Image: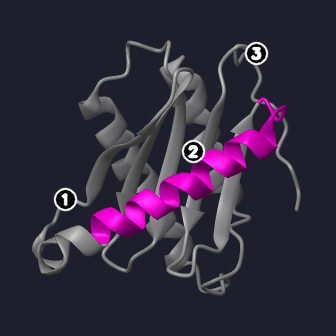
């Protein structure tokens, strides 16, 4: 898997991870900045996917009727907060943010997920993208990088 470089101007102390997963929890896109301790992020994300599955099954039919698919805080730790979002087609987005970043409110996280979802939709509309393949779109990667830098 190609690892994207650390975003320029991104503070080294902050760590982020984005993951878009399909129904079978196969990673379609993973991004972590900086890349150290990436295994720790993979563990947190996959642990959070279990929470996402629990929330989806608990919501049941109500989830299908909702237009807002933001799941909120999934898995808080001392150092990080993990948030989740699920699309109508059951694609899961998980975001890990630094707990010390108190500037991020629920509305900002929600709007970031909407922006991520819109960009994901653009990737899916590309006729050269095969659904289920890893996302290797420069436009998607640029949007994620800009979101990571913007928040700090």
Q: For mark 1, what is the residue?
A: 68
Cα separation, mark 2 vs mark 3, equals 20 Å
Q: Are marks 1 and 2 in contact (CB under 8 Å)?
A: no
Image x and y of residue 136, in percent: 74, 64
Residue 119 visible to the viewer? no
Q: Provide the residue span drawn in magenta.
A: 34-56
Residue 67 quadrant: bottom left
Image x and y of residue 40, in percent: 73, 40
Quick one: label 3 or label 1, which is nearer the N terminus? 3
Residue in view at x 30 percent, y 24 percent: 105
Q: Are marks 3 and 1 in contact (CB under 8 Å)?
A: no
Cα separation, mark 1 vs mark 2, equals 21 Å
Few, some or many residues within 10 Å of mark 1 (<14, 14–19, 20+)? some
Residue in view at x 50 percent, y 64 percent: 120
Element on which disc 1 rests: loop
Q: For mark 2, what is the residue?
A: 143
Q: Are marks 2 and 3 in contact (CB under 8 Å)?
A: no
Q: Tell me, yes or no, whether the highlighted magenta stretch contains residue 51.
A: yes
Residue 71 visible to the viewer? yes
Position of 117 relative to 100 (above/below) = below
Q: For mark 3, what is the residue?
A: 12
Residue 143 quadrant: top right
Element on which disc 2 rests: helix
The dominant secondary structure in magenta is helix
Element on which disc 3 rests: loop
């Amino acid at each position: 898997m190609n690892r994207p470089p650390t975003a320029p101007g991104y503070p080294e102390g902050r760590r982020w991870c984005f993951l878009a997963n399909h129904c079978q929890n196969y990673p379609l896109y993973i991004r972590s900045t900086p890349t150290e301790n990436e295994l720790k992020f993979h563990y947190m994300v996959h642990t959070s996917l279990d929470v996402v599955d629990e929330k989806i099954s608990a919501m049941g039919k109500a989830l299908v009727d909702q237009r807002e698919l933001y799941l909120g805080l999934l898995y808080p730790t001392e150092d990080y907060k993990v948030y989740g979002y699920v699309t109508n087609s059951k694609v899961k987005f998980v975001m890990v943010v630094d707990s010390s970043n108190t500037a991020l409110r629920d509305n900002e996280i929600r709007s970031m997920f909407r922006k991520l979802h819109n960009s994901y939709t653009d990737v899916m509309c590309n006729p050269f993208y095969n659904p289920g393949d890893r996302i290797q779109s420069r436009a998607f990667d640029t949007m994620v990088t800009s979101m990571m830098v913007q928040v700090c």
